Image (cartoon, helix red, strand yellow):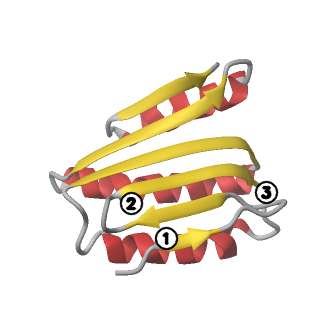
Amino acid sequence: MENFHLEARQHTPFISFDPNTGIMEMKGRSTPENSVEYYAPVLEWLDNYLQSPCTQTVVSVQFEYFNTSSSKCILDVFKRFAQLHKTGKSVKINWYFEEEDEDMQEAGEDYSDILGVPFEVLVIS
């Protein structure tokens, strides 16, 4: 399986998923014109990854901002990792936010409450 990589653009985040190491990263801004279309290949890649995942998957997320339509798509991404966790594989999500960014802190806490997987909300000072 190949790595999945999208460079950050003005309205879309950097995304890098490595199926060989189980290291998954998402960071930046997510305000694409069509979130469902933008995240479709991400979800497709994750569906394939779920067929033959690493023993341990670590997801690092650091958004500066995301719009409402992106929030649903991001939840869909996280739900794939929750599915993986339910199969007994080790999954950990690290949600990073800037110290003064209460909105991003709350978003991370909300996702953590919804998912039921090891999920840490971590401040960047």
In the depicted structure, whether residue 44 falls above or below residue 89:
below
Number of numbered discs on residues: 3
The residue where tag 1 is placed is 43
The residue where tag 3 is placed is 31
In the depicted structure, whether residue 117 falls above or below residue 1:
above
In the depicted structure, whether residue 17 falls above or below residue 68:
below
| Mark 1 crowdedness (10 Å alpha carbons): few <14, some 14-19, many ≥20 | some
Between the C-alphas of marks 2 and 1, the distance is: 8 Å
Considering only order in the chain, which callout, 3 or 1, is on the residue closer to the N terminus?
A: 3
Left or right: where 43 falls relative to 10:
left
Left or right: where 110 falls relative to 118:
right
Q: Which of 13 and 79 is in front in this view?
A: 13
Considering only order in the chain, which callout, 1 or 2, is on the residue closer to the N terminus?
A: 1
Q: Which mark is residue 75?
A: none
Q: On the image, which quarter does residue 9 sit in? A: bottom right
The residue where tag 2 is placed is 80
Element type at mark 3? loop
Please, what is the three-letter code of the amino acid marked with disc 1?
Leu
Q: Are marks 2 and 3 in contact (CB under 8 Å)?
A: no
Q: Look at the image and tell me in which quarter the C terminus lies.
A: top right
Please, what is the three-letter code of the amino acid marked with disc 2?
Arg
Between the C-alphas of marks 2 and 3, the distance is: 21 Å
Which residue is drawn at the image coordinates 68% and 56% (left, top)? 70
Q: Nearer the viewer, residue 12 or 73?
A: 12
Determine the residue located farthest toward the bottom in the rendered image. 1
Q: Are marks 1 and 3 in contact (CB under 8 Å)?
A: no
Left or right: where 49 falls relative to 55:
right
Which residue is drawn at the image coordinates 30% and 57% (left, top)? 83
